[in-house]
Amino acid sequence: MPKIYTKTGDRGETGLGNGRRVSKDYLRIEAIGAVDEVNAWIGIMQNSECKIQNYNSKFKICEWLKEIQKDLFIVGAIMSQSKLTMNVAIGERTEFFERAIDTLTNELPPLTNFILPGGSVTGAAIHVARTVCRRAERRVVSLMKSENDESLAPVIMYLNRLSDFFFTLARFVNMQAGAEEEKWIL
């Protein structure tokens, strides 16, 4: 990338990885943008979480977050190439999330009610990342349906499990910070 600006998008179009020009409100661009937002929220999490907590060596949270950021760049690249198959071991990554969720859950008190998003600043940021991840998942589902593109199914599975991971991570970070979970009771 010689320059950050190319002026080719000044009229509301952008390019996909396959060279095709599309409108910036095209569903595929919406999905890619939502995934990019998740990645940016992970950057916020890392900035606040990885510099202040001392339990990361046990759980490798900062390493996990960095790997997720790399995964999300791959996911964005895959989505920019219409009908491109997944070239990352997405099943392995999904299983990783399941193991990480189980590991963190073992450290947490049982969940008996819905909880309000919040707690510590980092915990709240993780909850925002979780909701943005759910939005990205919905956008990819819409894209898969509108373009009949089953190659996106692994991306949906990945994003679904990632948002579950974020929920558990937010609870864990809040517990470590001493921020009590606020239960939602009707």
Image (cartoon, grey):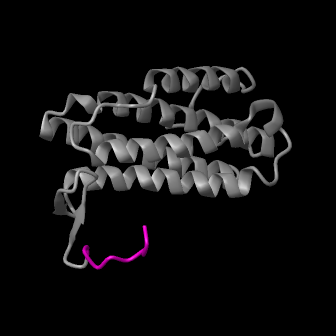
Q: Residue at x 72, y 25 (%)?
A: 109
Give the main secondary structure, helix, strand or loop, of the magenta stretch: loop
121 versus 84 height, above or below: below
Q: How many marks?
A: 0
Q: Is residue 3 left or right of residue 78?
A: right
Q: Is residue 124 left or right of residue 52?
A: left
| Residue 139 in view of the camera | yes
13 versus 113 height, above or below: below
**In the image, which residues are magenta?**
1-9
Q: Residue at x 46, y 47 (%)?
A: 73
Where in the figure is residue 118, as x and y percent of width and height?
62, 50
Q: Residue at x 65, y 48 (%)?
A: 123
Queried whether the magenta region covers residue 118, the answer comes back as no
Where in the figure is residue 121, as x and y percent of width and height?
68, 56
Nearest the eye: 114 or 19: 19
Q: Quadrant of the N terminus?
A: bottom left
Queried whether the magenta region covers residue 8, the answer comes back as yes
Picture quadrant where residue 15 is located: bottom left
Nearest the eye: 92 or 145: 92
